[in-house]
Amino acid sequence: MWASLRKQLWKSRTVWITAPSAAGIVILLRLLGWLQPFEWMALDRAFLLRPVEPPDSRIVIVSIDDQDIKKLGHWPLKDAELAKLLERVKQQKPRAIGLDLYRDLPVEPGHQNLVEIFKTTPNLIGIEKKGGAKDIPVAPPEALAKLGQVASNDILQDGDNRIRRGFLYWTDNETEEYLESLGLRLALIYLEVEGITPQAAATNQNYLQLGQGIFPIFEKNDGSYIRADAAGYQILLNYRGRAGTMQRVSFTDLLQGKIAPDLLRDRIVLIGSTAESLKDFFLTPFSSTSLTSPEVMSGVEIQANLASQIVSAALDGRQNIQVWSDWLEHGWIVIWSFVGSMLGWLVRSPRLALASIVALEGSLMVGCYLLFLAGWWVPVVPPMLTLAGSAIVLTGYAAYQEREDRQMVMNLFGRHVNPEVAEAIWRDRDQILKQGRLPGQKMTATVLFTDLKDFSGITERIDPETLMDWLNEYMAAMSDLVLDYGGIVDKFIGDSIMAVFGVLLSQDTPTAIAEDARKAVRCAIAMATTLDTLNLKWQRQGLPTTSMRVGISTGMVITGTVGSRQRLDYTTIGDSVNVAARLESYDKTLSGGVCRILISETTYQLLNDEFLTRLIGTVQLRGRERPTKIYQVLTETRRMDD
């Protein structure tokens, strides 16, 4: 029995390797924050799909929109107008009034009347903006500040500028100063009438409990967040719906007595701007991805949603959004990685495996959505990645022997080419595996040579170990660019790189040859940009900065493998190789910024005016009988007249 068990475990070893590896990679990507935007998108989608909730009848917004401002003929409201508005609101005897308008300075006439209203309205709460690293603080109304009737209207924007969190308390860790948010302060006034006061939650003494509602403190890595700013007492916002969900009356209708006489009685009333011209709007989970017309929500409605969330949780038991611990989330990801691995191990048919992956992914999304409806924000993107990734890896394991043969071929070419070129080589593998080498071929290609300026001087200024690390970082970056632009790295010669565009996948048509030339020049320009970035990094690290020269030539070349059975290299030879090398080393006093790019006349004629160039002149290159026209490529995308 034990022998059979060991045999089964050995056969399934790829499951025990693949599942933890896939989960580990995804968890690492998550911890680095790379998955955070996608997980935010998944959360937003859950909000959009959630059934519409009815407006909260306990909340009313008195909105000041563009039509109201147009009728007034000015902005901001004068103190006399604001005093009149507050008096009308008071007449209907609301439980709490939130003035979500900055009033740090008098706006005459009528300031004394407004101050008197402030002093005689104990359930009126004004606002101040505490601000942060990017925000400018705004002082509260002086009269309300003296009475302690002030709250914070600060908001928290995520990296994509959406509002998914809200303050219960704004705090300053250095001074230990704190201030309730406007939504919380209004909710506390409302709930006090119901006999509900703030308590420490039985489940966690650090959490606030109001009636049936417990409000977990947001931590910096909650849900999909990675190292978020968790200052103060924050919670995840549980919006009731899209913008416009909250009951709203207009400023003008209220002043003109066009609303029911008891509409505001015993309610929370928030007064604020909804005018597009004042631009007090923010993106929320309900906002569209359109940059031209995203759905946005006014600041006063966000505060109204916060107040509604608190009151609804306290009185109705409406769920706040909760998250799992980090370890539970990681375990969830690992479980789905094992599900995918077992699927890939048991189902060898690619089509059936694909159908099974789709079915399981759908089940996972539905399950996470149902948990969201119950108030839990559970990771969905990471387990989807591990499920699909591990299943695909295990399904592909059936082709292991084929990959062994592929490795034999790739040992020769893998360091030279990008994946597309490697696939082309694999298609011709029979000839390579049979003969052990590629026969010579004659074709038209574009050759690119690079060299560093004053490399000898740099070698004298830094120690060998640092020099090799520095040089390898440069070589790796430039080689990656060659592969990204469809070329192959032919060889490294000291600090020089030789790359070729248009071999292995050679297509000897004028269009293909011209495109290879343009790819080489695009690659050179990208090298300039990358070297600029590297120089900035090296400068910060106290390492040498440098510049480079590039020579590019298009023409006939001969390609093939050279060497012995013990050591084979794929290489390119021919006149164009020599011309590219001469262009790179031509007149080293000729300036070109961080990357001087010289091209041959043949290459120039193939560029189709895509790049900004200038004629250097007709010169006699070393080793050539005929004079050669040389052009310099600049870093813009239009062509300069010669």
Image (tube, rainbow, N blue to C red):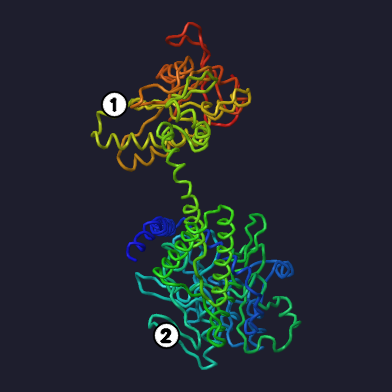
Would you place residue 116 above or below residue 613 in this image?
A: below
Residue 80 in which image quadrant: bottom right
First of labels 2, 1 by sequence position: 2
The quadrant of the picture occupied by the C terminus is top right
Which label lies toward us, 2 or 1? 2
| 91 sits left or right of 151 in the view | right
Q: Position of residue 599 (x, y in %)?
A: 51, 21
Q: Is residue 159 visible?
A: no
The three-letter amino acid code for the residue at tag 2 is Ala
Q: Position of residue 389 (x, y in %)?
A: 49, 55
Would you place residue 460 above or below residue 407 in this image?
A: above
Q: Secondary structure at mark 2?
A: loop
Nearer to the camera, 392 or 599: 392
Nearer to the camera, 208 or 558: 558
Q: Position of residue 582 (x, y in %)?
A: 43, 16
Q: Is residue 302 visible?
A: yes
Nearer to the camera, 55 or 358: 358
The quadrant of the picture occupied by the N terminus is bottom left
Q: Which residue is mark 1?
A: 457
Residue 27 in which image quadrant: bottom left
The three-letter amino acid code for the residue at tag 1 is Gly
Tell which residue pokes out farthest to the top in this image: 625
Q: Which residue is mark 2?
A: 201
Could you give the CA–CA distance between mark 2 and mark 1, rounded to whole angstroms?
Answer: 68 Å
Q: Secondary structure at mark 1?
A: helix
| 279 sits left or right of 473 in the view | right
How dense is the environment of label 1, judged by Cα within 10 Å: few (below 14), some, or many (20 and up)?
Answer: few
